[in-house]
Image (cartoon, grey):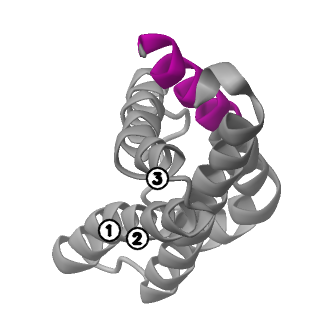
Amino acid sequence: MIGRWVGQYAVAAVIFGVLDGLWLGLVAAPLYDAQLGHLLAEQPNVLAAGAFYVIYVAGLTYFATHPAVVEGSWRRALLSGGLLGLVAYATWDLTNLAVLADFPATIVLVDLAWGTFVSAVTALGTYAVARAVPFLH
């Protein structure tokens, strides 16, 4: 049983890491620089970023992917992953909008869309791999 969880977690970590890396490195960087440049650190806090990824992928696995695999429902993976992404990214962005002066609403909308999308795709992709690989389901 633990092997299934660890395997699903590993698959989700790879999918989420690749997608978010591409997003941050190629797509979002110019937008974030333009909209948040005055708030951005010169160098990201790698420990904090790593902690986010470890915790977030665990949440995706626990709340979205694993239940969908057990149930045999790709729809549940897609919906639960997307909903978790929306909630998590809304927590970050709407809190920033509420308490930080000049936090751009454009970033909120873009991040909510991205968080929902990347989380849904990660959960769905992990579900597909887990259903295809016998020891993962």
Residue behind mark 3: 71
Mark 1–mark 2 distance (CA, rounded to whole Å) = 6 Å
Magenta run includes residue 47 = no
Query: Is residue 13 found left or right of 100 in the rendered image?
Result: right
Mark 3–mark 2 distance (CA, rounded to whole Å) = 18 Å
Label 3 vs label 2, nearer the camera: 3
Q: Please provide percent x and percent y for residue 31.
A: 67, 71
Residue type beneath disc 3: Glu
Residue behind mark 1: 87
Question: In the picture, which quadrant includes the C terminus?
Answer: top right
Mark 1–mark 3 distance (CA, rounded to whole Å) = 23 Å
Question: In the picture, which quadrant includes the N terminus?
Answer: top left
**What element does badge 2 sit on?**
helix
Report which quarter residue 119 is drawn in.
bottom right
Residue behind mark 2: 83
**What element does badge 1 sit on?**
helix
Marks 3 & 2, CB-CB < 8 Å contact: no
Residue type beneath disc 1: Val
Residue 7 vertical placement versus 75 (above, below): above
Query: Is residue 133 found left or right of 48 in the rendered image?
Result: right
Name the residue: 57% across, 70% down.
Answer: 75
